[in-house]
Structures are given as C-alpha cells and as structure tokens.
C-alpha cells in the first residue's frame, strides 16, 4: 500500500474511463447505423498478486443473442421471398386491369360475345362484321400482350437471380475474410466485436437471398450452410454460379434434365471445385432467390398455362368440326389417317353415372408426358394415327383403360369393319353421346370457323393451330403469345357469316347459322380445361364456358396476388417485431449512453481528483524537510 | 459498478434505432390506409384490382359481363321490334290490297260489265304494284321479305312480273301459253271415239286440259293411264239401260273437280237437261251418247276451264322456285318444263331444293304405293308408265302421272331412307342425270330464316319471306286478275277468272292475317322480354355496387378515425423527439 499504488489505481481509472468514453461516443455516433450493435467495454479489478491494483478493461465486446439473430435471419429470408412473390403477383393482378374499367381479358372476350350477338341480328351489316373482327383481334392481341408481360416477368426474375448471385458471392467472400481475421484477433485477445458486426451484415445479405444456417466455432469463426445442407463458407467460401438466359420465352422451362432445360440453374462450386446443382439437389426454400425461382418456374408458368389454355380453348371451340356419330346410325368411318389432334369422344352410362372417354389421334410415340396435356388423363387414350387400322387401335386402347371400356360386339364400342367404329345395337341405350372432332382449317367448309391462327402475320405466314398433343413441340405451349386473327377473314369479313354447304350451295348473307354457332360456342358451350391450369382438381378438370374460364383465371390470379400480399405483410410484421427485439437487446439507446457518459465523466473527475490528492500528498511528503 | 454497464437480460431495453424505425413504420402504415380510403372515396369502389375483390372477383366479373350482354340484348330487341313494325305495316297494306282486289273482282259482274271489268283490272294492277313495292321494302339495307337473303330485293318489279322483261316472259304470256295448252284444239284435250257400242273418251294432255278422274255407272270402264300420258275412259252404250246414270268426274287444270251426269232415256225427242251438268241421251244409241258427251264437255270447257286455266297458270308461275310452263308447242304439250332463262323468276332469293319422295325407275314397284300429289325423280331406264321419262319429275295424280322436265341445275332432295340417314341433295345434269351433290343444307322455315339474339340461349325467329303462302297468294290473286285476258265483247272468260280470284283473295287474306297474328305474338313476347331486361339491368347494377362499391358512411367514419390517429401520432412523435437526456444535460 503506497501512494504510488493509489496513483496507479487512479491513473488506471482515468485510462479505463477514457476508453469507456470512447466506446460510449462510438455507440452514440452509431446509434442509427444499420447492423451496429451496442459495444461494451467490460472492466475488472486489476490484481497484482493477491492485491488489487486499480481497474482494467478487457477486450470490447458486444451483447448479442446468437439464437435470436439466427431466428431473425430466418424471418428475413422468408420476408424476402414473400416480398418478391407479392411484387410479381401484384404485377400480374394489374395485368388484368382495374375491376371497374372493364379492361381485363374476360371483358374483352365478353365484348366479342356481345358484338357477335349483334352480328346474329345484323349479319348483313358490314360495320357490325368489322366490329366483330376488331373485337376478335383485340382478344388475340391482349393474349399476346399478356404473354409478353408474363414472359417479361420471368425474364426479370432470371436476371434478378443473376444479379443476386453476385451479391451473395461477394458477401460469402467477405465472410471468409472476416472469419480469418476474427480467429486471428481472438487468439491475440483483441476485440472482435466490430468485425462480428460486419460479418453479421454480410450474413444478412446472404440470408435475404438464401435461407442459411450458421454454426459458431470456438475460435469465433462461423460456418455457413444452406438449409439444404450445402456448405457455403467453412474455412473458405464456396461460389454460386448461375447460367441465366437473356430472354425467356414461354417454351423455355426448368427441367432437371440439362438437355431440355431452357432457363438457368443455380450451381454451388465448392473451394475444391466440386459442382452441385442446388435446384436439382436441395433448392432454396426461403430468401429472394427462392422467391424468384418460384415465380420463374411455378407461378408465372402456371399463369402462362392458363393463358395458353384460354387461347387454345378459344381456337378449338370456334373451329371444332363435330360429327355426331349417333346421328349417322351409330357408325363412323375414321379418316385415313386421322389428322393429328383429332379426337373421338364417347359418353356412355356406367353404374357410377355417365363416363366420357376420349381418344386422341397423335403422331409421336405415346409417352407419359402427353397425359399432362389433356384435361382428363384417367379417361383418355392416345392412338397412333398412322396405325394400320386406327379404329381397331382406338378400341383396343379403350379396352385397356382402367376401368376398361366394354368393347366388342356386346360392348359399347366395336369395330366390325376395318377403319369403322360402331356402337353395337344392343348397347345403344347406354350411349349418351359419341362425337368425332377435327379442327377445321378452312373458312368455308361448314358453320364452324377458324377465327384464330397460330403465329403472327408480321412474322411469316400464320399456321393452322394444331391440337396434336403427341408432338415434341406442343403447340399449346406459349400459344397465347402467338395467337392471331385469321388473315383470310381480315381480307373478307363476309366469311364470318357465309360458308359453303356440303352440296356446294353458299349460305345467304342473312343466314345466322355461323354467327349463332360461334356465339354459342363462346358463351354457352361447356368445355373441360387442362389440369395444368390448376383451376380444377386433380381428378376432375375445370369445366365451364370459355367466359367462365377467363373469369376464373382473372380471379385465381387476383386471389393469388392478394394472398401473396397479405402473407408478405403478415411476415413483414413478424420480421419487424423480431428485429425490434434484437435491436432492443443489442442496439444503442442514446439516453442510456448519455447516462453512462455522466457516470464515466464523474468517475473520471473522481479519479483525477485522486491523482491531484496524491500529488498534494506527495507535495506534503516532499516538503518535509 | 461495472456490471451496470451490461444490460441485464430481463430488462427490456428500447434501442433508439428500433424506436425510430417503429415510429416511421407506424406512420407509413397509417398514411397508406388514409391514402387507400381517399382512393376509395374518389372512385366509389372498394378495390382497384380483381385481386382486392378476392373470391368475389368472379361474381363481379360475371355481373358486369351479364350487364354488358343485357345491354346488347336490349339493342337486339329494339332492332327486332323495328323490323317487326316494318313488316306489320307492310302486311297491313298487303291485306288492304288483297281486299281491294276482292272487291274489284265483284265489279266485273256489275251492270255495264265492260266498265266494271276495266275497273277490276285496274284495281288489281294497282294492287300488284302496291304489294310488290311493299315486299321490296328495305330497312337499313335489309330487305325484310327476303328471309335470309337480306341483300336481295325479293320480288320482281310489277311490269316484269306481268309482262316479262329482257326476253323472259311474264305472267300474262304464261297464262296465254297455259290456256293454249289446256285448250288443245279447243276441246280441253279430250276426244271421243266409237267402237261398236262403246264410246271411248281419251285425254291426251297429261298435265293439261280436263282430265277424267272418275267414271261410274253401268257399262263404264277406266279411267286408265297409258305410257303416252293419255287417260282413257269407256262407256258401253249397249249396257246402259233406260233411267241409268253415268257420272263422269273431271279435274280442271287448277285442281278443282267438275262432274257431269249422263242419263239414258227412251223419251224422244230427248228432254231438256234438268241442270247444267246433267244431260239426257238415248238409251242404247251409241251415236247419241257420243254427241251428248261432246256437248257436255264443251259446256264445261266454256263455263269453267278458262278460269281454271288462269288459276293453274298462276300456280305454275308463283308456286315453284322456277316457273313451270307448258312444253312447246303448247297446244300439243303433255308436260310442264322448267326454263328459268325464258320465264321471269318472281321470287329472287334462292329457294330450297324441291322435296321429292325418292328416286325410282319402276312406278309399279313403289313401296308404299304413291299418294296423289307425291313427286318422284324418274331414274334412268325407267319402265312402265314412266318409260321414256328418264330424269323427269313424276307427280302422281290419282290415276296416272304428270311429268315435269327439270332444267340443268335443278336441285331436289329425296326423303332419307331412314331417320338416321342424312338427307342428300341431287342436282339435274345434262343428259337427264341426277347427281348426288352432297348432304342437304339444314332447312329453315321462313320464320327461322332471320333470328335475333335476345337473351342467353334465346334466339327469336322473326323472318318473313314473300313466298310464304299468305303473302304469295295475295300477290298471286292480284297478279292473275291483272293479267287475265280481257275482251270487252266477251265478258265470260274474264268473269270466270274474277270469280275464282274472289275466292282465292279471300283465302289469301286469311293466310296473311295468320302471318300477322304469328308476328304479333313474337312482337309482344320480345317487347315484354325487353322490359324484363331493363329491370334486370337495374338489379344487376345494384348488385355490382353491392359487391364492388364502398359504403360511403363507413368510409367517412373510417377516414375521420384515421386522420385523428395520424394527427395524434404526429403530436406524440414531436414530443418524444424533444424528450431526450441530451437536452437536459
């Protein structure tokens, strides 16, 4: 015990308080800095041997709850995904126009129906016919434009993924560097608090884009995994790669098969150079990238499917040439060969009620993927149209369905003569309908009319739309983007009304058969819509008129948008609350710091006073003569 | 002391940044809500996009679609009403004209017949002009009486109709030709002959003149048809005893029946005939029978056949899509022919194919047996009574067959063999061949030829065609009277026509009223549907507001509350801002 000891203690107090003020001032200065956590400079009694020798500080630390932070990162991941989804979906919702301005696709189709109605009244009026053409053109153009919007959104998603990948990679690289630095400093007993803040910031960047898990190692360094278990940063950082496309069209889809994949995929390259396809192995579930991928590969694809189905149904409905087999003595001779995409539909009564079985005549070998292309795959058979006897092949296929269609002389369908199908007389009371459908490709061969064609007249010659589901390039895919008004009608809109009968006579100008048929098919005939529109259930396709379908599509997309928005908002509140909690624990409160400052200040002056007292005491001591 | 620098875990700290963020967040949310409320106030709708309406988006769209459609239907109804009004007015005038023709026909029998007949003719002629011009009325470029062929004026002009035009003959010439055909050599195509005690009455005119249809009484035979289209009846004078009656039935060219009765008597000289169609002849005297028969026939010709021939010519001209005229030369013609290049086509729109029973070659093998009035197509290599008539249309007349020769391009539809078969159309080609030219187009009635879309799934048929019986017969009556041969010195032929026309005009008037009544029902139904649409539209509008519209009172209250909350928040933020330790140091 000596004056020198007191002096030392006082001086240590001065030094510690100076350091304290430094920390407080940094805290105050960074009170509003994102990612800054409140720093604490812990102090302890300095011991020399068994005796106290003043005060000393240990390395500055921060007060952070690691698990809370981990949870916050997970919430931020989810928020980021839902924000993306809400953002994209709201754009789709807006694509259908505002509810009261009546500009959506369902209104355009309805307008076409209304104009067709007045064409039924006035088929001779060229003005009305012109209006029908204009409306039909508007429908085609709107479908084109909506496709452009949807594919534009997909392209944007693809580009956003590419941009995001760079952020993630640089963040991972920084985490790797910071890990090393932290480990080094921690070994030296230096403070790592600010470096950890920095690392948390980078980690936040990664978490916003991908859902990650972290493990803190004893040396202070951190290991980062994807939630799927791939290591992003261990000793060294892995690198994400994305082979994005510049422009995405409706036919470019994700596939696990690299050959047929039309869009980019996410590859993780480990420091050792091993490559892993994340989308194939363990796709991200949360984070912006997950949201973007969900948009690109699911939500927007489904929206496009609905549009395509609508365009498909419009085209098929108006140009479907139906032969009622029951009207021709229950016997029909198939064309040789049937056109690709022709259908034979048979509805007969079973114990469980009426059952409709459809046979599609296709060119390509029969594969399972074709089942996804028809409304009711369980009751559908595919028949090679080039088979030696397509009628017999069809009946065999129907007999192989489960449950089997009764075939043969005592069944509901039979082929006694090659190429001919017939419903045996004994079972005709069970037949509800039997129809053969083919798409008309002429503007004059009957009341149906091929109003729409496949392809823009600005780029080459539009083709006849084909319903062939067995083709490698399925015509329905992206059809909404290619649908256009038949140019034959544009050059002569009289064809909207007149056509040639089988016997060669032409219908008179005032004949309403064709306008009335088109109108009926558009507004009153019920169709089955393909399963991939997700409007119906798994086992039962969505049934309705074309207008119903257009309305259901608008509602379904709108509803998805609202749900996405609601979910994003809810999640936003959750994330915010957790963020407040985290900030409350490790953030800076200026008032608190000010109070600390007062204490430090008084402590400092007290220490200074001690120094002065010691000095005075020394003076007294030295002045003893 | 140092431990107080660490925040204890159970102490809920508030970080400055967190507080700041919270205040900003809350204020932004309030602002957003206020902005939404403001937008709702100005638009009157709850949401801007379909998404906002959630599941009700379908309902909202459906209601709006329905409203648009109802608007369209209402327009259609207005169009239909306008058309029907036009048609009804025209029909009123057609009825007035045909009444006028009927009254005019009576004039022909008035004292001072020459003037009366003249007046009949003039009134009929002006009725033709009036009816034709009404039938050719067009309303906004649509001819109301053309059925579906709205761009074609349905009826030929009155002058062309009566007098012909451009080398094609009109009704007058057709009537003259028909009269010549019916007269033959002045004997109504009948001739008599005697063989032993038997008198033979032979008709060689096929479709023309007075055709014997029945004979009854002792010693009678026939009538029998022969391949050369002649029909023969016989009376054996040796069998007819005193007091016996032989009755002969004839069919006039217009299808009306006339019968004469010949009574055998032994009273000489023969008594005066008790009625105009009853004559006495000397029993057992074949020469007397022949003479009396000839007399009876000439009386009928003078009294009846001229008028009947005119009516028949009117039917030939008006009742078919292509007028049928007697073959050339008319006096010896045995069949009608179609020749559209030589006769005016009074009804211009394309007519449906001719309905025929079937195509056959042997009239003796027809199953079921032919019924009077049924028409067949005579197939190649025909036999029996059809021999030599390949390709012609044969119509059964009860005894034999009358033939009509089609022209190249004539279309006919045989009845399908079974109900399940599709009806086919056959077209007549050069070389007397009928070729199958495809499935028959759907046949529509005159009403169905024009339809208006007035409701979901509801088409209202409101077409009218000038060749509907009620309208056609009105025009026919007027035209036949206007075209009838007129000789001031011989009133009889004209009066015969006038008499028949007065009946026909009466019938036509009735048919025209029937059409009007039918259209009236359609008019009334359409009108009430229109009223329902208007009411429905109001209802729809209210429903749309119910689904999409915002409650103004609720909105005003909400807006008020939001503004209060926002103001309170501002006040608190300002006070919080002033409240910090720094300002007290």
Image (cartoon, coloured by chain):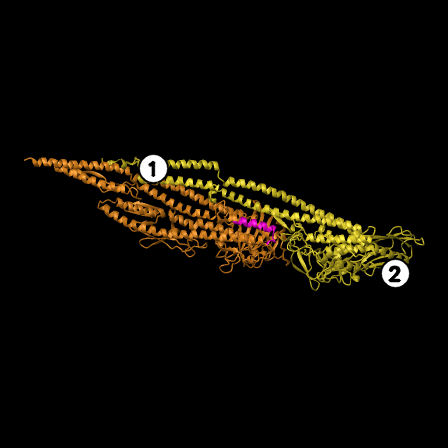
User: Residue A391: x, y in percent?
Assistant: 57, 56
Q: Which one is in front in this view, the residue at disc 1 or the one at disc 2?
A: 1
Would you identify the image quadrant in which residue B71 lies?
A: top right
Chain under label 2?
A: B
Q: Could you tell me what secondary structure mostly forms the magenta stretch?
A: helix
Q: Is residue B3 left or right of residue A106?
A: left
Q: Using residue A172 as the reference point, say whether residue A15 is left or right of it.
A: left
Residue B329 drawn above or below residue B461 = below
**For residue B200, above or below residue B62:** below
The single residue placed furthest to the right in the displayed view is B268
Point out residue B532 in the picture as x, y percentages from the top left corner. 60, 41
Q: Is residue A101 left or right of residue A164?
A: right
- Vertical relation: B339 (above or below) A155: below
Q: Which residue is mark 2?
A: B195
Q: Is residue A210 visible?
A: no
Q: Earlier in the sequence, mark 1 or mark 2?
A: 2
**Residue B256: image x %, image y %?**
79, 52
Secondary structure category for the residue under label 1: helix
Same chain under badges 1 and 2? The reply is: yes
Q: Which segment is the magenta one?
A: A108-125
Give the residue at x 51% y 39%: B546
Query: The N terminus of chain A is located in which quarter?
Result: top left
Shade representing chain A: orange
Q: Which residue is mark 1?
A: B574
- Chain shaded yellow: B
């Amino acid at each position: 015990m000596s004056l020198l000891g007191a002096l030392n203690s006082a001086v240590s107090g001065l030094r510690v308080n100076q350091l304290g003020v430094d920390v407080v001032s940094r805290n105050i200065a960074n009170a509003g800095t994102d990612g800054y956590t409140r720093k604490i400079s812990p102090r302890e009694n300095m011991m020399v041997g068994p005796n106290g020798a003043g005060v000393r500080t240990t390395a500055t630390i921060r007060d952070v709850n690691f698990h809370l932070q981990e949870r916050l990162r997970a919430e931020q991941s989810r928020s980021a995904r839902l924000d993306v989804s809400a953002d994209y979906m709201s754009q789709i919702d807006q694509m259908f126009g505002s509810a009261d301005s009546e500009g959506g696709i369902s209104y355009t189709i309805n307008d076409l129906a209304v104009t067709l109605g007045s064409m039924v009244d006035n088929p001779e009026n060229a003005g009305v016919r012109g209006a029908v053409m204009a409306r039909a053109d508007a429908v085609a153009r709107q479908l084109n434009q909506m496709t452009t919007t949807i594919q534009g959104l997909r392209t944007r998603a693809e580009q956003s993924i590419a941009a995001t990948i760079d952020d993630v990679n640089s963040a991972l690289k920084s985490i790797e560097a910071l890990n090393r630095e932290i480990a080094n400093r921690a070994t030296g007993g230096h403070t790592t608090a600010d470096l950890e803040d920095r690392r948390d910031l980078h980690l936040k960047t990664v978490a916003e884009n991908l859902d990650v898990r972290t493990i803190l190692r004893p040396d202070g360094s951190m290991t980062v995994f994807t939630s799927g278990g791939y290591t992003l940063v261990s000793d060294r950082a892995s690198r994400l790669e994305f082979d994005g496309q510049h422009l995405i069209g409706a036919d470019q889809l994700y596939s696990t098969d690299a050959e047929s994949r039309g869009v980019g995929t996410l590859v993780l390259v480990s420091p050792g150079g091993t490559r892993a396809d994340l989308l194939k192995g363990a796709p991200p579930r949360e984070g912006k990238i997950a949201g973007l991928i969900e948009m690109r590969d699911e939500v927007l694809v489904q929206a496009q499917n609905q549009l395509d189905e609508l365009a498909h149904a419009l085209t098929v409905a108006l140009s479907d040439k139906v032969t009622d087999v029951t009207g021709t003595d229950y016997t029909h001779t198939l064309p040789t060969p049937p056109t690709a995409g022709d259908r034979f539909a048979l509805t007969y009564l079973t114990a469980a009620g009426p059952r409709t079985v459809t046979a599609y005549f296709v060119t390509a070998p029969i594969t399972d993927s074709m089942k996804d292309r028809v409304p009711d795959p369980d009751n559908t058979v595919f028949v090679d149209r080039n088979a030696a006897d397509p009628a017999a092949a069809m009946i065999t296929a129907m007999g192989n369905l489960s449950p089997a269609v009764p075939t043969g002389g005592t069944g509901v369908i039979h082929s006694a003569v090659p190429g001919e199908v017939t419903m045996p007389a004994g079972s005709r009371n069970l037949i509800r309908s039997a129809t053969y459908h083919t798409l008309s490709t002429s503007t004059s061969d009957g009341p149906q009319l091929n109003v729409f064609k496949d392809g823009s007249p600005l780029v080459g010659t539009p083709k006849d739309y084909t319903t062939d589901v067995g083709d490698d390039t399925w015509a329905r895919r992206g059809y909404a983007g290619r649908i256009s008004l038949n140019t034959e009608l544009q050059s002569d809109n009289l064809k909207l009304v007149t056509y040639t009968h089988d016997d060669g006579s032409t219908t008179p100008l005032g004949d309403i058969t064709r306008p009335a048929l088109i109108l009926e098919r558009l507004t009153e005939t019920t169709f089955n819509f393909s399963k991939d529109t997700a409007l119906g259930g798994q086992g039962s396709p969505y049934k309705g008129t074309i207008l119903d379908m257009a309305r259901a599509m608008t509602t379904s997309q709108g509803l998805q948008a609202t749900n996405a928005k609601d979910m994003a908002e809810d999640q936003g509140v959750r994330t915010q609350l957790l963020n407040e909690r985290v900030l409350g624990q490790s953030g800076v409160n200026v008032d608190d710091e000010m109070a600390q400052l007062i204490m430090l200040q008084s402590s400092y002056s007290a220490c200074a006073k001690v120094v002065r007292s010691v000095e005075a005491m020394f003076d007294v001591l030295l002045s003893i003569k | 002391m140092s431990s107080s620098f660490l925040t204890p875990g159970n102490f809920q700290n508030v970080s400055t940044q967190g507080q700041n963020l919270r205040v900003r967040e809350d204020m932004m949310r309030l602002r957003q809500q206020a902005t939404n409320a403001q937008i709702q106030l100005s638009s009157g709708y709850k949401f801007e996009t379909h998404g906002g309406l959630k599941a009700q988006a379908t309902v909202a769209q459906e209601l709006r679609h329905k409203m648009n459609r109802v608007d369209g239907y209402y327009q259609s109804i207005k169009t239909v009403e306008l058309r029907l009004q036009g048609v009804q007015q025209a029909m009123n005038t057609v009825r007035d004209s045909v009444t006028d023709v009927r009254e005019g026909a009576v004039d022909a029998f008035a004292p001072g017949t020459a003037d009366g007949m003249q007046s009949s003719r003039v009134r009929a002629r002006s009725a033709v002009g009036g009816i034709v011009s009404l039938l050719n009325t067009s309303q906004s470029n649509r001819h109301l009486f053309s059925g579906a062929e709205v761009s074609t004026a349905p009826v030929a002009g009155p002058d062309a109709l009566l007098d012909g035009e451009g080398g094609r003959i009109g009704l007058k010439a057709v009537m003259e030709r028909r009269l010549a055909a019916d007269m033959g050599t002045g004997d109504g195509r009948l001739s008599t002959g005697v063989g032993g005690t038997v008198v033979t009455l032979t008709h060689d005119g096929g479709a023309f003149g007075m055709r014997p249809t029945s004979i009854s009484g002792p010693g009678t035979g026939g009538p029998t048809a022969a391949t050369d289209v002649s029909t023969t009846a016989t009376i054996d004078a040796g069998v007819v005893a005193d007091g016996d009656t032989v009755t002969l039935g004839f069919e006039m060219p217009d299808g009306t029946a006339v019968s004469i009765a010949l009574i055998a008597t032994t009273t000489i000289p023969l008594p005066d005939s008790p009625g105009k169609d009853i004559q006495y002849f000397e029993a057992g005297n074949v020469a007397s029978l022949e003479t009396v028969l000839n007399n009876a026939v000439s009386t009928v010709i003078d009294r009846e056949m001229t008028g009947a021939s005119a009516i028949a010519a009117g039917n030939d001209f008006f009742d078919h899509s292509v007028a049928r005229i007697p073959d050339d030369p008319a006096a010896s013609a045995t069949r009608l022919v179609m020749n559209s290049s030589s006769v005016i086509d009074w009804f211009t729109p394309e007519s449906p194919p001719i309905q025929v029973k079937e195509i056959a070659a042997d009239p003796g093998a027809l199953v079921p047996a032919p019924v009077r009035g049924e028409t067949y197509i005579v197939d190649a290599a025909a036999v029996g009574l059809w021999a030599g008539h390949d390709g012609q249309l044969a119509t059964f007349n009860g005894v034999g067959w009358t033939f009509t020769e089609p022209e190249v391009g004539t279309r006919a539809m045989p009845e399908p063999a079974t109900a399940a078969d599709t009806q086919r159309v056959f077209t007549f080609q050069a070389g007397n061949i009928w070729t199958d030219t495809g499935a028959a187009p759907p046949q529509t009635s005159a009403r169905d030829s024009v339809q208006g879309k007035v409701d979901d799934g509801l088409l209202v048929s409101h077409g009218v065609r000038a060749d509907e019986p009620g309208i056609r017969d009105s025009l026919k009556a007027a035209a036949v009277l206007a075209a009838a041969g007129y000789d001031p010195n011989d009133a009889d032929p004209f009066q015969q026509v006038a008499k028949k026309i007065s009946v026909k005009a009466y019938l036509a008037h009735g048919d025209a009223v029937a059409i009007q009544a039918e259209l009236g029902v359609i008019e009334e139904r359409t009108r009430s549907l229109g009223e329902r649409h208007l009411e429905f539209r109001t209802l729809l509008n209210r429903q749309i507001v119910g689904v999409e519209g915002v409650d103004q009172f609720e909105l005003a209250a909400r807006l008020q509350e939001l503004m209060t909350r926002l103001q309170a928040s501002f006040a608190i933020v300002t006070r919080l801002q002033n409240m910090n330790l720094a300002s007290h140091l």
